[in-house]
Amino acid sequence: MRQNHGYKATEDGVRLFFQTLGDGPVPVVIPNVLFMLDDFSRLADGRALIFIDWRNRGRSESGGSAEALAKGIEHDGDDLDRIRRHFHLEKLAVIGHSYSAVTAVLYARAHPEHVDRVVQIGAMQPFLGKDYPAQLKCG
């Protein structure tokens, strides 16, 4: 997988932007940090890096049904799985920064069979006092 870019259309018609770099048997998805492509490029030796922009951010399209948008962060996890399937990956590693670090863990929790590893960089913390849905709480 040499450097390449394009779009993957979701089931609800939103096109997600991706850019790949490198070639190798270890696929690594790095969401929402395309601006750091040069910083991560040294990881491309022996790996296939796949940078993606979440919907409504970066070069990905805005949109989606009200129902889909109401899923919030879980919706981004669904889009991460769409990218995995688009590239025909059985397993992937995810490097997540800030908000995307939380998304990476939620994805791993929902799809452990498709995750090789998760690396979190500066994961954002939950908002104190917010009542999160049961599936997003520890316990």
Image (cartoon, helix red, strand yellow):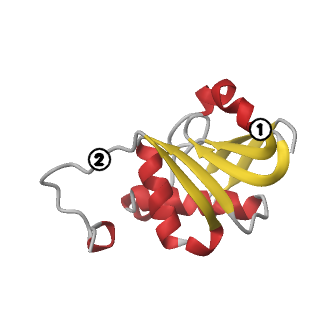
Disc 2 secondary structure class: loop
Residue 65 visible in rendering: no
Left or right: 19, with 131 as reference point: right
Left or right: 21, with 131 as reference point: right
Residue 22 visible in rendering: yes
Q: Amino acid at mark 1?
A: Ala
Tell me if mark 2 has few (under 14), some (14-19) or many (20+) residues whose alpha carbon lies within 10 angstroms of its own. Answer: few
Q: Position of residue 89 (x, y in %)?
A: 75, 64
Q: Quadrant of the N terminus?
A: top right
In the displayed orientation, state which residue is furthest to the left. 129
Left or right: 120, with 13 as reference point: left
Up the image or down, 84 lies above or below 125; here it is: below
Q: Quadrant of the C terminus?
A: bottom left
Q: Mark 2 vs mark 1: which is more N-terminal? A: 1
Q: Position of residue 9 (x, y in %)?
A: 69, 54
Up the image or down, 126 lies above or below 68; here it is: above
- The quadrant holding residue 133 is bottom left
- The quadrant holding residue 31 is top right
Up the image or down, 24 lies above or below 19; here it is: below
Residue toward you, 69 or 76: 76
Residue toward you, 109 or 73: 109
Residue located at (62% from left, 32% from top): 34
Residue located at (78% from left, 46% from top): 47
Mark number displayed over residue 125: 2
Tell me if mark 1 has few (under 14), some (14-19) or many (20+) residues whose alpha carbon lies within 10 angstroms of its own. Answer: many
Q: Which residue is mark 1?
A: 44
Q: Position of residue 105 (x, y in %)?
A: 46, 59
Disc 1 secondary structure class: helix
Q: Amino acid at mark 2?
A: Gln
Mark number displayed over residue 72: none
The CA distance from mark 2 to mark 1 is: 29 Å
Q: Position of residue 97 (x, y in %)?
A: 48, 40
